[in-house]
Image: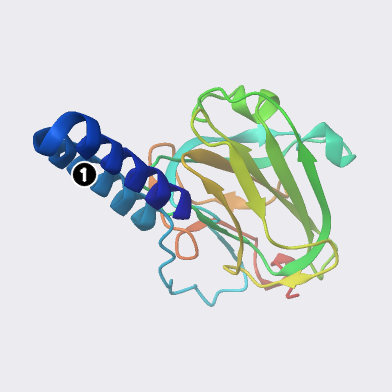
Amino acid sequence: MAAFVLVSAGVCWGSFHFLGWIGGAASSVVCGLLTLWCVWFFRDPQRSIPQDADAVICPADGRVVITDDCAPPAELGMSGEPMRRVCIFMNVFNVHVNRCPVDGRVEKIHYRPGTFVNASFDKASTHNERSSMVVAMANGRRAVVVQIAGLIARRIVCRVKEGVSLSAGERYGLIRFGSRVDVYLPRDVTVTVRVGEVTKAGETIIARFAGSAGGRGGV
């Protein structure tokens, strides 16, 4: 936000100096709108997190683009067996604060550099820059959340470290300016969202475990 303000101030000063009042006024309007948009982009609204031990909470605002079975990123060193996957694409108008989908302990975080193709494409899961987080639940199961950079996004922020405990719906990071979040879950969960459905981080339930005996199991 500070960068937007400083650049906007510089452009406006230059426009008034070299283009006169009309050019300066036009530049001021454009720069002002862009700065307001940047401030609005980093909004972080409060959310009503469902108090349901069997629910998997959506980690991102956006639109569901893929629901399938897929192995988590290879760099995590997991078994390579397919897991339930839900992919959520965030455009530049969505809230970009990401939230943990289940209660658990952060077992592993792995950053991998990569390309910046459109995050709505399936190949973004493989080729794009990403930060993966493995969350170990108290019942021994694991969920994986992958922050994926997009065509415009160039900055992934993960604000937690390995070993910390998170609650479902708790904030843990963000991605700046358009991106995607993939969630990998145990195969016996029931996915409750469809491709094309709009989601809200911390509120939308994207999947359910099969009863309290197999739920997310607390922190």
Which residue sits at x=39%, y=41%? Answer: 92
**What amino acid type is highlighted by mark number 1?**
Ser
Q: Residue 218: tell me if it is visible.
A: yes
Q: Nearer the viewer, residue 39 or 219?
A: 39
Determine the residue positioned at 45% across, 60% down.
204
Of 118 and 136, which appears nearest the observer?
118
Q: Secondary structure at mark 1?
A: helix
In the image, residue 99 above or below residue 116? below
Q: Residue at x 66, y 34 (%)?
A: 69
- Judge left or right: residue 188 versus residue 161: left
State which quadrant residue 43 falls in: bottom left
Spot occupied by residue 141 in the image (x, y as percentages of width and height): 81, 59
Q: Please state the horizontal and vertical placement of residue 209, each as a whole percent of the image.
A: 64, 60
Residue occupied by mark 1: 28
Residue visible at 81% across and 71% down in the picture: 138
| 185 horizontally vs 66: left or right | right
Q: Position of residue 82 (x, y in %)?
A: 75, 35
